[in-house]
Image (cartoon, helix red, strand yellow):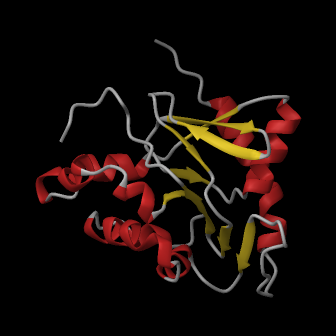
Amino acid sequence: MKTNFTKPFVLAGAIAGLALLPACSSDTDTADEDGTTQEEATRTLAASLGDLSEMATLNSVISDAELGSIFDGPASYTLLAPNDAAFNALGEEGEALMAEEQRPVLIGLLREHILPGHLTPENIAQAIEDNSGAVTMTTLGGGEVTFAMDGETITVSNGMGSNAKLATNATAATNGVIIPLDTVLVPKEAPEA
């Protein structure tokens, strides 16, 4: 079976190139009144994520999965970041996922929430508009997520039965962007942990 990964990477590269211009500023900007991205130009993703109170569970999960160094390095990533309410909504499934023996599953799940490059919600909305519809991108884990518009809200789907909405303002750091989600993108057909 032949898989074409070129199109998502070309789109990601094009969007990332657009996103790098505002990220190069040395000033720290605040979100627009209706804005979706707050610039944290002097902080890494790891530091910015640590300051977001609604991301305590995700911070713990990243630490437990030993993935923190990824977000402190020079490479640029976009983290589709499920908020605390999203993890709480998983209930017993979420608790089981946090068990030590489930670490490989947890790491795989986190990798499906990471995109290469510096993508803001504004960039994603522009790509959806330019494409006249949904835009699909390849995750760090090799899966795909599809962004679409639902009225004025950007939604994201993992193509395996899980959908989320962008929950609150995004935070742009020196090495990427944190985009809060209201749902953890868990494959629905996966066996329970």
Seen from the viewer's position, the closer of residues 117 and 184 is 184
Residue 179 at what x, y percent from top left? 61, 60
Residue 57 at what x, y percent from top left? 36, 68
Q: Residue furthest top?
A: 1
Quadrant for the C terminus in the image: top left
Q: Residue at x 43, y 60 (%)?
A: 85
In the visual, does 157 lie left or right of 102?
right
Q: Which residue is drawn at 32% across and 26% down?
A: 189
Q: Residue at x 33, y 49 (%)?
A: 90
| Above/below status of 186 relative to 39 | above
Seen from the viewer's position, the closer of residues 131 and 88 is 88
Which image quadrant is residue 151 in? Answer: top right
In the visual, does 86 lie left or right of 128?
left
In the visual, does 95 lie left or right of 151?
left
Q: How many labels does the image show?
A: 0
Residue 18 at what x, y percent from top left? 83, 56
Which image quadrant is residue 167 in? Answer: bottom right
In the visual, does 40 lie left or right of 110?
right
Seen from the viewer's position, the closer of residues 51 and 78 is 51
Which image quadrant is residue 66 in? Answer: bottom left
Seen from the viewer's position, the closer of residues 65 and 154 is 154
Residue 163 at what x, y percent from top left? 53, 38
